[in-house]
Image (cartoon, rainbow, N blue to C red):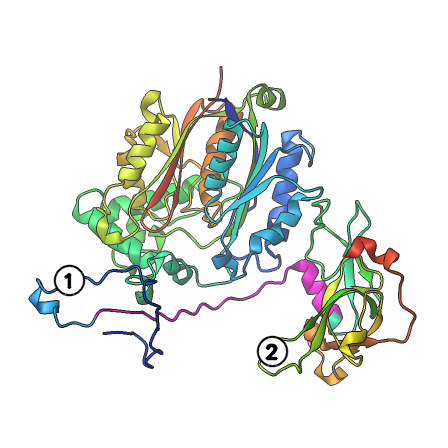
Amino acid sequence: MTDTASSEPAPIEIPEGVWSQPEVDMSAIEEIASVESVRSVRAFASLTYDYTPGLATTRFLRAIKEKRLVGERCSETGKVYVPPRGVSPVSGLPTTEQVELGLDGTVVSFCVVNLDFTGNAQEIPYVSALILVDGSDIPIYGLVREIPYNEVQPGLRLKSVWVEDSEMTTSFENIKWWAPNGEPDVPASELADYV
Amino acid sequence: MRDVAIIATAQTKHVRSATTVNEVELIQPVIQEVIERSGLGRHDFDFTCSGSSDYLAGQPFSFVMTLDAVGAWPPISESHVEMDGAWALYEAWVKIQTGHADTALVYSYGKSSPGDLPRVLSRMTDPYYEAPLWPTSVDIAALQARAAIQAGVTSEQAMADIAYRSRTSAAANPFAQLTTSAQPLALMDEEYLADPLRRHDCAPVTDGGVAIVLAAGDKARSLCSRPAWIRGIDHRADGHHLNFRDLTTSPSVRIAAEKAGVANGPVEIAELHTCFTHHEPILRSALGLGDDVEVNPSGGPLAANPMMAAGLIRMVEVANRIHSGEVSRGVAHATGGHALQHNLIAVLEGEG
């Protein structure tokens, strides 16, 4: 037996000298002398979980279904976190005050993606950016479109582009991507705390 | 060796399923409570160590998110074990012994409710020979229980007695999940879950967490009127493959108990990490406990079993009784892996 899977795996090519397992001399045991050695085992595993977003993230997800972005404020530092997970990472205290955020934001950092690891879901190159949503103190990830990739830079002002109202769910995927909103760039000095 | 003590403890009210909160929302109140009880400020801890497992929540690096609850800014000295919190305490104890810390915050938690726990735990087996068979934790425990019954270590009647005693003891534990039980004879009438285990023989599936504060020497004396001193602590592992072991005994517990000095004085109480009823006689024997030693006055894991926390809770239950002056010397045991594979023993004492 060489494999437990129904489909045969591609043969593994190992360069000479790399294989550290010496051949085992099994000739003394007659019954197994002709048995082919096991080269690989495929054991498929699958576990199913019910995801619990928690109190704060549930509030965020319910709001995003209504095309609203809601962060939560740290009672000690005043910083607003989005998406909120219920606890301020600086003070360790629960965030209990909900804060209505804007639907626009600012690029604080970005990268141009030239590798297709989404399986053609995204035309390359594309821009993935850290976007500081208006009214919040921590950037979120977002896709930037409707602008040539080589014109994206920190400080670029963006608007969120949403799916049709009929398609809105309790999901971050309600925001399809972010696009320039036409406002002047934010000076880099104002973004120093968020990079 | 430096004198190190547990000076403060806190735990959740353990429940079958904490469906409304995420992991950080689950553990944050416990961490806040233990910090307040310790008398230390949030930034006064020289070291922080936690225990949890990504397999329970099904989320990679989930422990990084729960670090939010300690307020890790400015940056702190911190570590994590993918093990029960008892081993996080062990790491913190070593850190204090080496002189790198005088105080430590230790916490651990588990939300088992998102997945199918017995199946999730099957992933602890070796990946080549055992894991492809998907043996659940209950299946493996049943093999051990059958072997223990055949060896005369226990009986189905004795196991039902342990279940009854544990859950009725838990009636006095405000944090316990299961606090009632039918009479042992009635329990024996139930169907097998996995022969010879019935439902009552198995610890419940639990969501919950725990936190403790450790302090060394005079620091501990200044913060706590009666610290629970860790007089001995040791952990040992038996082989991973089930077929390499005699499942009816626990050599690793016996050696850890010797190294921790369990027999160096009277044992007033023992809190044992018994995930199944048949674990108790195996552990009693390996620890050399007499029949007069009270085991699991809190109800033990058979009354509340938050994965990754239930071992550290054993230390908390002994420490609480030392803090209150109820006892002066007790033994705490924590386990990891299947069928009592990896075991930690601690001896806790009060002074005066």
- Looking at the magenta stretch, what is its main secondary structure? loop
Q: Chain of mark 1?
A: A
- Indicate the position of residue B124 as horizontal and vertical percent values: 38, 56
User: Can you give x and y, in whole percent of width and height, for residue A144 in the image?
Assistant: 76, 75
Residue B309 higher or lower than B135, as above or below: above
Q: Is residue B328 left or right of residue A138?
A: left
Tell me, yes or no, whether the two marked residues, 2 and 1, touch with CB atoms within 8 Å: no
Judge by depth and name the residue closer to the eye, B77 or B263: B77
- Residue receiving disc 2: A116
Residue at position x 53%, y 26% in the image? B323
Quarter-of-image position of residue A27: bottom left
Give a yes or no on whether discs 2 and 1 share a subunit. Answer: yes
- Asked if residue A54 lies in the magenta stretch, the reply is yes
The kind of secondary structure element at disc 2 is loop
In depth, the one of B134 and B73 nearer the eye is B73
Instruction: From the top left corner, tell me how far across and down residue B17 is, in percent.
Output: 53, 57
Q: Residue beneath label 1, please?
A: A25
Q: Chain of mark 2?
A: A
* Circle 2: residue type: Asp
Above or below: residue A34 compared with residue B13: below
Looking at the image, the residue that sits furthest to the right is A184
Q: CA distance from mark 2 to mark 1?
A: 46 Å
Q: Amino acid at mark 1?
A: Asp
Based on the picture, tell me whether residue B10 belongs to the magenta stretch: no
Q: Residue at x 80, y 46 (%)?
A: A77
Left or right: A142 with respect to A102? left
Can you tell which mark lies on residue B208? none
- Residue B185, percent from left and from top: 28, 49
Q: Which residues are magenta?
A: A37-63
For residue B111, say whether it is visible.
yes
Of badges 2 and 1, nearer the viewer stands: 1
